[in-house]
Image (cartoon, rainbow, N blue to C red):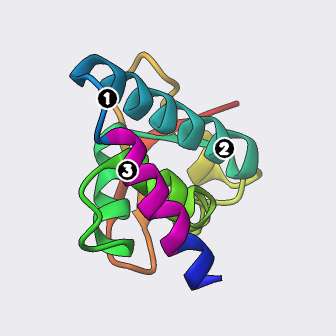
Amino acid sequence: MRKFAFAAFMSAAALLGGCTTAQIEQATTTVEADIQAGTAALCGIIPTLQTITSVAAVMFPGISSITAVAVAGEGAIEQDICSAAPAPASARYRALPRVGSAPAVIGVTPHQVVVHGWRAH
């Protein structure tokens, strides 16, 4: 699996080498939106973009862009963030703000990253 992820990462890095800044920014926005949608579906929270990049930096040190992280393990980032989420039936979950309000501290991942965000439902 690691060989596959590394090969995929190298392919993505080669592809992004010829991209414009606007294309890279669009790809980054897409990956971040995918992770937010994935965590919303998986565990009912929407992490802030800073949380996503912080978790990615801890889980995949040495990978410099969020688009490369998508190749390396978007699902792993979602799982790590979800590990910090309270159960949807809990009072702590119901107390989380919805999008549009200031984000709240949701919890801490196993990699010791503080997750900020909102409840999805």
Label 1 close to label 3 by CB (< 8 Å): no
- Residue shown at 55% from the left, 38% from the top: 36
| Kind of residue sitting beneath label 1 | Cys
Nearest to N terminus: mark 1 or mark 3:
3
Left or right: 16, with 119 as reference point: left
**Range shown magenta:** 6-16
What distance separates the C-alpha of mark 2 from that of mark 3?
26 Å
Left or right: 102, with 72 as reference point: left
Q: Is residue 94 visible?
A: yes
Nearest to N terminus: mark 2 or mark 3:
3
Q: Is residue 54 magenta?
A: no
Residue 63 screen position, x and y as percent:
29, 64
- Tag shown at residue 38: 2
| Kind of residue sitting beneath label 2 | Gly
- Tag shown at residue 19: 1
Against 93, is 19 above or below? above
Give the foreground label among 2 and 3.
Answer: 3
What distance separates the C-alpha of mark 1 from that of mark 3?
10 Å
What distance separates the C-alpha of mark 2 from that of mark 1?
26 Å
Label 2 close to label 1 by CB (< 8 Å): no
- Residue shown at 70% from the left, 30% from the top: 121
Q: Circle 3 sits on which residue?
A: 14
- Of residues 103 and 32, the one nearer the viewer is 32
Look at the numbered disc 3 and give the secondary structure of its residue.
helix
Q: Is residue 52 visible?
A: no
Residue 118 screen position, x and y as percent:
49, 36
Against 40, is 58 above or below? below
Look at the numbered disc 2 and give the secondary structure of its residue.
helix
